[in-house]
Image (spheres, rainbow, N blue to C red):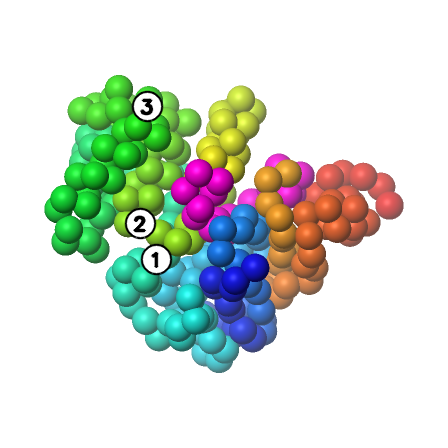
Amino acid sequence: MTELLALDDVNVYYGPFHALRGNTLTVGEGEIVSLLGGNASGKSTTMKTILGLVRPRTGTVRFAGEDITQASTRRRVRAGIASVPEARRVFPEMTVDENLIAGAYTRRDKAGIAEDLDRMRTHFPRLAERRKQQAGTLSGGEQQMLAFARALMSRPRLVCMDEPTMGLSPKLVDQVLDEIVRINRELGVAVLFVEQQAELALSIASRGYVLATGAIVLQGTARELLDDPQIQEAYLGKAV
C-alpha cells in the first residue's frame, strides 16, 4: 500500500510539558486507521500536529511524499488533508448548503465547487432535503453527516476525524461508522480517526495505534489489537 501520511519520531511540547514522545505512524492511500487512547493520551495533539495547529519540536510530518512539518493549515488543506472536528462543530446559524460551501474555502474553481455540492446532495440525501435549513436545528446524526460532507468539499485524500461517535445514540453510532466505511470505499478517501471505544474503532479499521501519556505503546492490525490482552483489559473490560 502506498504511504500517504507519515509522522516520523515526532516530539511535541506545550511549554515544558512533553505532549507527544517520539511518535511514528503511517496511513496508506485509501486506508482506515484508528488512533486509540484514553483522556490526555495525546490523541488530539496528534491530530493537531497533522493539521498544522501545533508544530513538533523535532521529527517530521510528510504527506504524499512532501515534508509538511512547517506548512500552514491552509496549505495542508490544499494538499488534501481535511478534518471532522470533535463534537461536529457545524456553523449553527448557517444553512446546510452554506456549511458545505464553507468546506471549499481554499478552492477557487466555482464550477468544481458547484459540481461537488451536487455530489454531496446525492451522496447525503438527508442533507439535500434540509439544504436551506439552519445547521443548528439538525439532529446530532445529521450534523455529523454535514460535518463529513463539509470536509469532503475540499476534495481531500485524507480525512482526520476526532471522536466522530461522541454523544450519539447507539443507533446513530452505527450509522456514523457505516458512513465512514462508505466514504472510504466509494470515494477512495483515507481516514484517520480518534476513538476511545476500541471495539467500535477496530471494527472498521484495518490498523490501529494505541497512545498512552503521549507515546504510542501498541500498534498492529485491527485483529491483532483486538486479540491483545492489554487492549482486552484496558478497553474491553475483560479480565486477563
Q: Residue at x 64, y 56 (%)?
A: 210
Q: Quadrant of residue 153?
A: top left
Q: Secondary structure at mark 2?
A: loop
Q: Which mark is residue 125?
A: 3
Residue interval drawn in magenta:
184-202
Q: Is residue 22 left or right of residue 128?
A: right
- Dot 1 alpha-carbon crowd within 10 angstroms: few under 14, some 14 to 19, many 20 or more: some
Q: Position of residue 138 (x, y in %)?
A: 31, 24
Q: Measuring from the top left, give residue 136's x and y in whole percent.
A: 27, 28
Label 2 near label 1: C-beta < 8 Å? yes
Left or right: residue 238 versus residue 162 is: right
Q: Which amino acid, by three-letter code, is at mark 2?
A: Arg
- Looking at the image, tell me whether mark 1 or mark 2 is earlier in sequence order: 1
Q: At 36% across and 65% down in the image, what residue appears?
A: 52
C-alpha distance separating marks 1 and 3:
25 Å
The amino acid type found where label 1 is placed reads Gly
* Residues at circles 1 and 3 in contact by the CB criterion of under 8 Å: no
- Front residue of this view, candidates 47 and 213: 47
Q: Residue furthest bottom?
A: 58
Q: Residue beneath label 1, please? A: 80
| Magenta stretch contains residue 124 | no
Could you tell me residue 195's position as x and y percent? 56, 45
